[in-house]
Amino acid sequence: MTFRRQASHWFAHLSPEWQVRLALGSGLTVSNLVGVGVVAVLCLFVVPLPQSPAVSDARVQSVQLGLAFAVLGGVIGSYHAWRTLHPVVVMLRPSESAGTISDRQRRHVLKAPRRIFLFQLFLWVWAAVILAAVNWRASLTLGVSLGLIVALAGSATSCVTYLLSERSLRPVARRVLATGIPARRWVPSVRNRAMFAWWLGTGVSVLGIILLGVGALIEPEDISLDQLAVTIVVVGALAMAIGLLSSYAAAEASSEPIRTLREAVERVDHGDLEVEVPIYDSTEIGLLQAGFNQMVQGLREREHLRDLFGRHVGEDVARAALERGIELGGEEREVAVLFVDVIGSTSLAENCPPAEVVELLNRFFAVVIDVVHEHEGFVNKFEGDAALAIWGAPVESQDLHTCTLKAARTMQRRLAEEVPELRASIGVSTGRAVAGNVGTPERYEYTVIGDPVNEAARLTTAAKQTDRLVLVNCALVAGATAEEARHWEERDPITVRGRSEPTRVAAPRS
């Protein structure tokens, strides 16, 4: 256990480039050595072959020749793998910029496992041909058998190298695919990966047993029942062991990226739009990972636009527009309107620096917005140093009279406490008005048009001459709850500009 811990610690301190080189190099070496060993054991002890001195000598010579070919093939295969991997793994170096990775380099990375697999298979096929050609003079059965054994073992070993290469090169694939998906490439599929695993774990063994049975039927005198039984038991055991490992490797290769996708979807479902899954699978799952990231990017942009839209027109208007769409025109509704205006803003602009004026107005509007939202209203627009708030549109209010009166009292108090440098008057009215989108399809705004808006603006002007700086239409007090109404007292009626009849008004009690 100590040795394993030390080895793991040493491996973790290697650079990512050398971690990939070591993992893939050792994996390819071990898999090919195991393949050679399996061939040797099968040829010498397991597979029943013709029994004669010439055949026995040929079997031993074949094993020796196979070992020599394994050394030569191992050198050639290692050199080819090194040449294939070198331009790939150098992308893990810190000096390599991800922004400079080209489409050609991405395709090169994704094709590397396939290139290694094909070259390994090429070497094993040549070994099978050479062994078959060398031994067919001693025995045609021996030559054909050895050729088939090597070919089947080589195809299985090559499948292992493909799965190992794909797994080992994931750090490189993660780096290059994070910058984009190649425009033109052969996309390996999950189906291909599953078929590799099937051939490795099941197909080779089953085909070997079938060929063994065919051989026993053709030349029954050369194969004893004991030899046939031992061969079937050994090949069956290998099929179970290798099949389990290969199926697990293929399943894990697909389930891991799917698991990260599922976890990312859960995070998005909980409102986290900053999630991004690493793209490192070269099959359709990689395209799915890329598509997910593009989808989340689109959701982020949409949320940003919705947030900006809501800040400009109000959250309620934005929500209504998203749910019902945009149509020019309006509808008549019962509304309450609050208008608040800074007193003496002209002299303020003349006597204070622009930055200070902006800072004061921002503090002023921050209080206005907070109070209106707290009392379930909607800030419709800002007009210089004034603001217009509405209750009853675009969302209906259950008790708009009470909410509006509470907002007016709270706003008066908080402005005096939090922005003492400014004085502001407040006017509130209620009645029927038209609320809707006004403008053109290219440019429009949500607004309220009608007598309550005009009266609220006139009451704001009149309130500047009062001690409380707040005037409301008495209709609001009459429609409010008794608890809220007791906070207001009626004042002398006033005749606002544009009207011939006086308006009954009220102000907050002292």
Image (cartoon, rainbow, N blue to C red):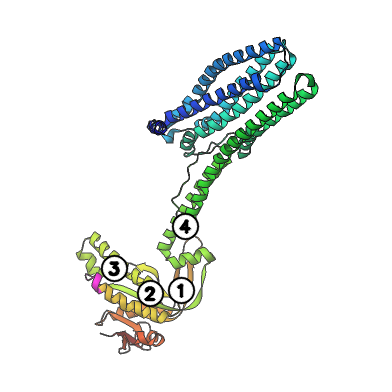
Question: Quick one: label 1 or label 3, which is nearer the N terminus?
Answer: 3
Report x, y in % for residue 358: 27, 62
For residue 318, side relative to residue 235 (left or right): left
The reply to whether discs 3 and 2 touch (Cβ–Cβ < 8 Å) is no
Per the rendered image, the range of residues in magenta is 416-422
Please rate how many residues cluster around mark 4, counting C-alpha atoms within 10 Å: few if below 14, some from 14 to 19, many from 20.
few
Q: Amino acid at mark 4?
A: His
The reply to whether discs 1 and 3 touch (Cβ–Cβ < 8 Å) is no
Alpha carbons under labels 4 and 3: distance apart: 35 Å
Please rate how many residues cluster around mark 3, counting C-alpha atoms within 10 Å: few if below 14, some from 14 to 19, many from 20.
many
Alpha carbons under labels 4 and 2: distance apart: 28 Å
For residue 298, side relative to residue 130 (left or right): left
What residue is pinned by disc 3? 364
Question: Quick one: label 3 or label 2, which is nearer the N terminus?
Answer: 3
Q: Which mark is residue 393?
A: 1
Q: Residue at x 39, y 88 (%)?
A: 478
Q: Amino acid at mark 3?
A: Phe
Please rate how many residues cluster around mark 1, counting C-alpha atoms within 10 Å: few if below 14, some from 14 to 19, many from 20.
many
For residue 329, side relative to residue 372 (left or right): right
* Location of residue 471 with respect to 256 vertically, above or below: below
